[in-house]
Image (cartoon, rainbow, N blue to C red):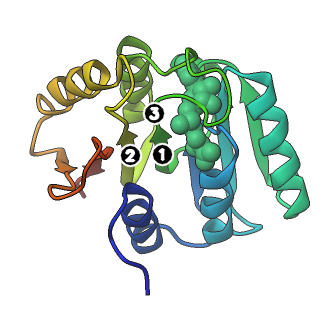
């Protein structure tokens, strides 16, 4: 049983409740590959995973991690910005995750940016399956982080409530600007 004291534990809970074996997942910011590996373990060998990152080091590390776990034949990790994802994806997406911000232990000046993040969200919304979710962990402690969160929040709150359930999780009693979690759920 996990404590719900961080964004990733809540993302995992939602992923487990929404996904089934054979589904297709998308990690829009693979980084070290932890999120996509978790999602692949849920969708299994019959599922499919797409991953994006603009840093070659992240792409290589994620491909290696997936290969070590025998998911190399049902995943595609692409070295390109998630704003271009439509060029590569030809399946409906059942669950998409963004871990925004910078890659830990790497160049902290390479960060996700609101304009390309919003462009990617819009692209994913066109290829979502019937009962799907986009989860965004938004870090606000680094320069540009709060600006990105506010821009994404402004965009998602305009989505039609007849089509999407949109919510934000905030850890209200934690110190040091904890990340926020934005959930977009496509309604049936
Ligand atoms: C917080 S890290 C992701 C952590 C990762 N999910 C994990 O499990 O380790 C954010 C990543 O977003 C990547 N990134 C920045 N801009 C991007 C873009 N436009 N498209 C795709 N990835 C991007 C960075 O290179 C960085 O690796």
Q: Residues within 10 Å of mark 1 (few under 14, many from 20)?
A: many
Q: Which residue is mark 1?
A: 97
Quarter of the rendered structure image containing ligand 1: top right
Task: Decide which of 88, 52 is in the foreground and name it.
Answer: 52
Give the quarter of the figure containing the C terminus: bottom left
Residue at left 67%, top 20%?
54
Q: Relative to 30, does residue 18 appear above or below in the rendering?
A: below
The verdict on label 3 being within 8 Å of ligand 1 is yes
Q: Which mark is residue 100?
A: 3
Give the quarter of the figure containing the N terminus: bottom left
Residue at left 45%, top 33%?
100
Q: Relative to 98, does residue 66 appear above or below in the rendering?
A: below
Q: Is residue 101 left or right of residue 78?
A: left
SS for callout 2: strand
In contact (CB < 8 Å): disc 3 and disc 1: no
Task: Measuring from the top left, give residue 185's x and y in whole percent.
Answer: 28, 52
Task: Decide which of 168, 44 is in the foreground and name it.
Answer: 168
SS for callout 3: loop
Residue at left 69%, top 53%?
48
Q: Which mark is residue 134?
A: 2
The verdict on label 1 being within 8 Å of ligand 1 is yes
In contact (CB < 8 Å): disc 2 and disc 1: yes
Residue 30 found in image quarter: top right
Mark closer to the chain start, 2 or 1: 1
SS for callout 1: strand
Q: Relative to 31, does residue 78 appear above or below in the rendering?
A: above
Task: Measuring from the top left, give residue 67's x and y in whole percent.
Answer: 89, 54
Task: Decide which of 99, 52 is in the foreground and name it.
Answer: 99
Task: Measuring from the top left, give residue 177's x and y in whole percent.
Answer: 27, 41
CA distance for labels 3 and 1: 9 Å
Of tags 2 and 3, which is closer to the observer? Answer: 3
């Amino acid at each position: 049983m996990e404590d719900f004291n961080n964004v990733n534990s809540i993302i995992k809970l939602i992923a487990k409740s929404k996904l089934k074996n054979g589904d297709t997942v998308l990690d829009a910011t693979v980084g070290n590959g932890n999120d996509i590996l978790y999602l692949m373990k849920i969708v299994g060998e019959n599922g499919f995973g797409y991953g994006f990152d603009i840093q070659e080091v992240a792409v290589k590390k994620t491909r290696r991690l997936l290969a070590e776990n025998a998911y190399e034949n049902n995943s595609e990790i692409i070295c390109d910005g998630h704003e271009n994802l439509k060029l590569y994806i030809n399946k409906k997406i059942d669950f998409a995750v963004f871990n925004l911000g910078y890659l830990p232990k790497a160049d902290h000046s390479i960060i996700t940016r609101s304009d390309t993040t919003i462009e990617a969200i819009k692209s994913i919304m066109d290829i979502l399956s019937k009962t799907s979710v986009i989860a965004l962990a938004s870090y606000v402690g680094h320069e540009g982080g709060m600006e990105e969160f506010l821009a994404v929040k402004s965009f998602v709150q305009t989505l039609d409530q007849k089509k999407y359930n949109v919510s934000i999780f905030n850890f209200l009693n934690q110190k040091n600007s904890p990340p926020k979690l934005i959930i977009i759920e496509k309604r049936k």
